[in-house]
Amino acid sequence: MAIRLFYGNALAESVGAEHGVARAEIDGLKPRAKGIRAALKKMRANGEIGFYDLPYDRQGAAASKKLAKHVRQGFENFVLLGIGGSALGPICVHTALAHPYHNLLDKKARQGAPRMFFLDNADPEWVGRLAEAVDLKKTFFSVVSKSGSTPETLAQLMVFHQAAAKAVGARSVDRHFAATTDPVAGPLRALAVQRGWPALDLPANVGGRFTALTTVGLFPAAVEGIAPEKLLAGAAAMEKRCRAEDLWKNPAELFAAIHFLADKRKGKMIAVMMPYSSALRDLADWQRQLWAESLGKAKALSGAGVHVGQTPVKALGATDQHSQVQLYAEGPNNKIFTFISVNRFRRVCPIPRSLPEIGELNYLAGHDMGKLLNEELNATEFALGKAKRPSVRFQLDAITPENLGGMFFVLEAATAVAGGLYNIDPFDQPGVEEGKRATAALMGRKRPEDAAKRVEIAASRKKVGTKNAV
Amino acid sequence: MAIRLFYGNALAESVGAEHGVARAEIDGLKPRAKGIRAALKKMRANGEIGFYDLPYDRQGAAASKKLAKHVRQGFENFVLLGIGGSALGPICVHTALAHPYHNLLDKKARQGAPRMFFLDNADPEWVGRLAEAVDLKKTFFSVVSKSGSTPETLAQLMVFHQAAAKAVGARSVDRHFAATTDPVAGPLRALAVQRGWPALDLPANVGGRFTALTTVGLFPAAVEGIAPEKLLAGAAAMEKRCRAEDLWKNPAELFAAIHFLADKRKGKMIAVMMPYSSALRDLADWQRQLWAESLGKAKALSGAGVHVGQTPVKALGATDQHSQVQLYAEGPNNKIFTFISVNRFRRVCPIPRSLPEIGELNYLAGHDMGKLLNEELNATEFALGKAKRPSVRFQLDAITPENLGGMFFVLEAATAVAGGLYNIDPFDQPGVEEGKRATAALMGRKRPEDAAKRVEIAASRKKVGTKNAV
């Protein structure tokens, strides 16, 4: 199989019963897993959650390809304006599947793809200085927001729409923009209609952090020359595996069960994801949103206060062996690790015996650098296991669009199952509302509630005290 | 002052005594802080720890500038080969102080600086494909390793030395290399001597993760046109502040005391650092090594088993509001946050009223994007405080070399003090040795102990079981 999940290092028989999960504990979750499976199936059938069906939705792929063709023909630069779930999937696809130095290559070496930029922050320097590096006359902007009202993204849009209008004239400017948003609702959809922008549909029943396989991920992929069908085909293959009714044969349920048990019974409140591949580093960043925002919840479905959720941590092998592994091996045993390995890299990189003066280190010569990277993972997995730190490993035969689609799917499905195990709603995010309201109030919005919020914030500041500083 | 540390939101009077630190608890640490201060002063005077004196060491700055002049005159590309402490400081300096799209600018816009690459992983694709993006004839390689025997770095060196020799010929190749390493010991120093490379000294009494203000950080900074003296001047100003004998007036001691108390008495085993500035994102990555590798220890100075150490998490505002803040606000209250804010960004970026169709969101228009970013921080700080999550904030008047030097210093000094509070050695890293030994064994090294290690790893694999996979 193209993707395998190894779990031996997470078991009690490997790292001991205090830190590892016993097979009997996993078996004990079978009845609950069965109930969760049925509940999710029902929600899927009712159209309440859409991500399960995305692997079979050819419409988004077709629309993405069509618009991508237009962009590839007419533009040198592609700028995605979006944040959170609107950016993390596309960034992950880019880092994993594009040339590692894509934006430095000429157009021929880029195989017709434009330079790619993902502006996922409202940073005045990062946003404001883009025009010093790219020619806006040759730049296409893709504005992505599910609600259509994300302040950071719309602020960027206002900046770039004016800048592009200055560069190409008010009559031509709207040819440089497209929207990806809700099919009918929200200010961005209305704007696209009024301005005549091409607009891609973002299914209403797919939450922002589950959108990697919608037009959100497929359109930028197609712009880069990555066939959306391949991402979907890999996701479909994984979807079939995640239907298995035996928890031990279902990678999504097994990943969820091991993590849930590690958290609740073994004190592993931190979940580290550590790919051993620079190209896969942003897969950990993408999953970090998925796991945190889906499972970090104050209330159970019953309404009872629970405050659950593992804290996901992104790491990168072998780099973070020189940064985090000291803590991982010797610090509090409060983590479970998910390694990601690659059997065949897309590039051989033999280590030559070019410097005989280097003496003993010549034991490295004659091997490929890919072997070094993989043996570093094997060594770290071994060393952490020896220190009784549990881990699992996703092993990919190669980095392909299919495998990336498969990883998106299995991690999304695992998140849905984990939500069931924690007995919380993995599809909402009530905890971000307070900050959103406060931001709007501080930026001078004029709804009736905004004035009250400003008073509340001022009172809080007074209490905290600005004099408490050194 | 250019850098201020606000701590009101971490106090019990703001977030309650269960989650916030009481003033009396901080006062209670004063005797220990006094003892730690004296012990560190003694180690400094004895030359056991060197980082305290770096702000006043002009030698490294002068040598860095001299070599940098040579690189800037003769090369288009600068490639740093190094990992962990050899890369994190330089990467942070680059992200913070270079143009955000530096490598895409032409040489004039780069103000004479070469394109900058930091290859901090032994990844065959990332390393192997560099030559497809840059001309090796115009490329300078800086090899950085304190011990001079880091396998990832020396493997890269063997690859690029051969590739560069092919490009420019064996007689010219050594003009493309320099080393930064121990002044006398190790294979890299020996190699530099034999090959006639310029070599910068890395003081023997400064550990890898404390080297940002040595030639490790200063040389790449100088190559980019950033005056090393400015980094050192900011560090010197902070060094003076960190001499204060009143804990409440000493930013390093206060940061350490609040984090130590938050961890040991309030259950905040995770320390999130969240700059609200894309340029400062890698300061959190740099600090993550410092905090984890210094404080994540199995044994106390007495030799007793302790397994301490907060888990540092890097985050980025406002981006991660759309990824992690749901968990931060509603999940387990097991975190303390360090925000970093910037008063004046280097670029104004006004949000124009360019799209009247956008309706209510026009409340954003007329403000600068820098205000939006700062109000998002204010809003998040407020929302997390309301949910009783403690935080501190470093407020920088601007992003300058001086302030970056100051941040390096205060966080290094805080780490040293925290080591004292945890009663562990913050300057060693015994926990990485097992993995290093295992890697060398798996790569076929031929020391007597390697064969035994291979047997041990094979036995472990058998126990873990390769059949435990789905």
Image (cartoon, coloured by chain):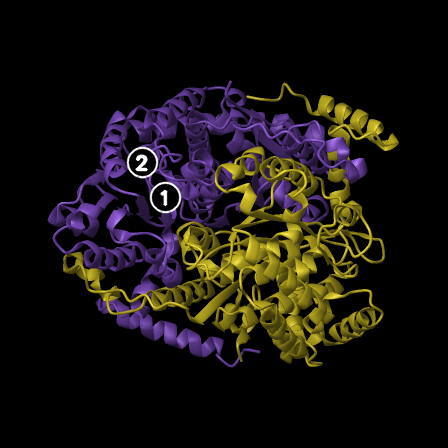
Chain colours: A purple, B yellow
Q: Is residue A327 visible?
A: yes
In front of the other: B40 or A450: B40
In front of the other: B465 or A451: B465
Label 2 environment density (alpha carbons within 10 Å; few <14, some 14–19, many ≥20): many
CA–CA distance between discs 2 and 1? 9 Å
Residue receiving disc 1: A116
| Residue A346, horizontal then vertical, whole percent | 52, 27
In front of the other: B122 or A109: A109
Task: Please identify the quarter of the rendering in which residue B255 is found.
Answer: bottom right
Residue under the image location 23 percent in, 45 percent down: A179
A457 relative to A436, above or below: below
In front of the other: B310 or A346: A346
Label 1 environment density (alpha carbons within 10 Å; few <14, some 14–19, many ≥20): many
| Residue B8, horizontal then vertical, whole percent | 52, 74
Residue receiving disc 2: A223
- Asked if residue B232 lies left or right of residue B52, the reply is left
- Chain letter of the residue carrying label 1: A
Residue furthest to the right in view is B448
- Asked if residue B453 lies left or right of residue A209, the reply is right
Residue under the image location 57 percent in, 44 percent down: A315
Q: Which quadrant of the rendered structure holds the C terminus of chain A?
A: bottom right
The amino acid sitting under disc 2 is Val
